[in-house]
Amino acid sequence: MTVYSTSANVSERATAAPSLAISTVIFALRPSESSGRPTLWLPLVRRIREPYKDLWALPGGPLTHVESLPDAASRNLRETTGLTPSYLEQLYAFGGLHRSPTQRVVSIVYWALVQPTEAALADESENVKWFRADKVGDLAFDHNAIVEYALRRLRNKLAYGSVAYHFLGEYFTLAQVREVYEAVLDTRLDPANFRRQLKSTPEIEETGEYLQGGKHRPPRLYRFTGRPGLDPDNRSTP
Amino acid sequence: MTVYSTSANVSERATAAPSLAISTVIFALRPSESSGRPTLWLPLVRRIREPYKDLWALPGGPLTHVESLPDAASRNLRETTGLTPSYLEQLYAFGGLHRSPTQRVVSIVYWALVQPTEAALADESENVKWFRADKVGDLAFDHNAIVEYALRRLRNKLAYGSVAYHFLGEYFTLAQVREVYEAVLDTRLDPANFRRQLKSTPEIEETGEYLQGGKHRPPRLYRFTGRPGLDPDNRSTP
DNA sequence: ATCAGTTCTAGTCAATTTGACTATAACTAA
DNA sequence: TTAGTTATAGTCAAATTGACTAGAACTGAT
């Protein structure tokens, strides 16, 4: 089985550029099956051909000539899960020599966050399944390393940045933000101190609304007004 | 002038993968020509063919089949400047549709830091020249945007991370570290407070040595003992 | 209607960190 | 010997953080 396309000849094999693929690590919060508290999940697709046939892998595919890198990432995200991300950022380009046993492939990997309302509608099937981020099992290629790195970046970015809000809808309670932090960082945080910190950041705006229908005192709803970040792609998410 | 290689046919043009290149933004500190204080510089190469003939551009070239991404970055860094970096990290993959007017190119860009002893030996020629990082002029392709982004990342990383020491040799004074911060962030920092902070980080080790030969009280020399960082390539720099 | 249970929210207080500043030590050059 | 300069330690108030207390506001059970 040869891995080079149709009309390539021997001299081209030596110099031909490695092929380019786009993959995406998609994170969403879902209630844990045991505790009911939100935990971090991601969708994987089952490989239907060699190499690594029948193993789970990150959604991905080749980059076509007519689309930008983030467009390609969005597209294969939509194609495999039906989802539209609320946040999409380039993670890393993985280009090790032996990532794929049959071919030299450089994968540019994106990571995406989707809101739970979106995530609930996600397509799931025989070949697309959601896994807890800390229990993905053995994946195809170097995808375990990629998922681990994506998790590190997510945790790191959460500490400094403004990503937490992209897991949530437009309006949210401060306790929901805390739950995002607790799920992603896998810790418990003091509710009173956490809200004091959030209230001191100018990017979080108090609204007049309250979340009704809960079992206890209705919490006030807030809105995030910050700007994306320093990613050069910078989808100005309208 | 066609941009596709020899035996490509029409149908391949539509689906052929975009070509892959590696570029590097190389930072080093050099004494400013005016004040003598260290400032941030980077080497650029003059383009000797179209497109953008005669404009300055980042060092770079195609990725060959037999080298990893960081190896390719090191190689073209060495080939253009003769330098060996003390720090090398992936910056970003740039893949906009119209980065090059003649061809679809995806560039995986690395950024490197070199120590001043190294940087002093750097090759300079008609076609390789060093520029102040804030005065590079109009560059080829999207390289102005790339340099700007590299600067943002460098500044950002300096605040949290451990990059500053890679601008310096194995032994350094705390004032030298401060000069790195001042050069990169373009501010002045209080010497006393700055050293208090450094001394509270466990990764900086006091040595028994002092830097002799200065004009004033000889400062103590320190050593950095921290580990690289969370980059997946992670050259464990022996 | 009342009360127990729970979460939301504001606040207190000591410990730690930060920013502005002062003072002394240790060297060189004149 | 002294003036000039950098290195280094320390002081003090302001700001931030972590642990904790307590009242407000709701639901569901009695």
Image (spheres, coloured by chain):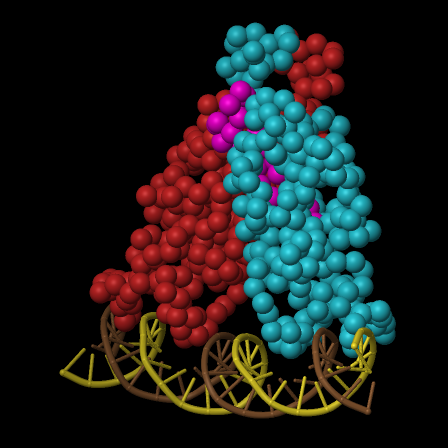
Chain colours: A red, B cyan, C yellow, D brown
Q: Nearer the viewer, residue C30 or A62?
A: C30
Where residue A194 sits: x, y (%)?
Answer: 43, 70
Does residue A185 lie above or below A199 as drawn? above
The reply to whether residue B109 is visible in this rendering is yes
Where residue A46 sits: x, y (%)?
Answer: 54, 32
Instruction: Indicate yes or no whether the magenta region holds residue B66.
Output: no
Q: Is residue A168 left or right of residue C24?
A: left
Picture quarter containing residue A192?
A: bottom left
**How many numbered callouts?**
0
The reply to whether residue A28 is visible in this rendering is no
Determine the residue positioned at 66% across, 16% down.
Answer: A4
Where residue A179 sits: x, y (%)?
Answer: 43, 62
Determine the residue positioned at 42% across, 64% down.
Answer: A178
Instruction: Indicate yes or no whether the magenta region holds residue B92.
Output: yes
Q: Which residues are magenta?
A: B91-113
Q: Is residue B116 left or right of residue B58?
A: right
Q: Is residue B121 left or right of residue A68?
A: right
Determine the residue positioned at 71% across, 33% down.
Answer: B126
Determine the residue positioned at 77% across, 39% down.
Answer: B123
Q: Nearer the viewer, residue B138 or A198?
A: B138
Q: Is residue B179 left or right of residue C19?
A: right
Does residue B102 lie above or below A199 as drawn? above
Picture quarter containing residue B21?
A: top right
Q: Nearer the viewer, residue A185 or A11?
A: A11
Picture quarter containing residue A165?
A: bottom left
Where residue A109 sits: x, y (%)?
Answer: 56, 38
Quadrant containing the N terminus of chain B is top right
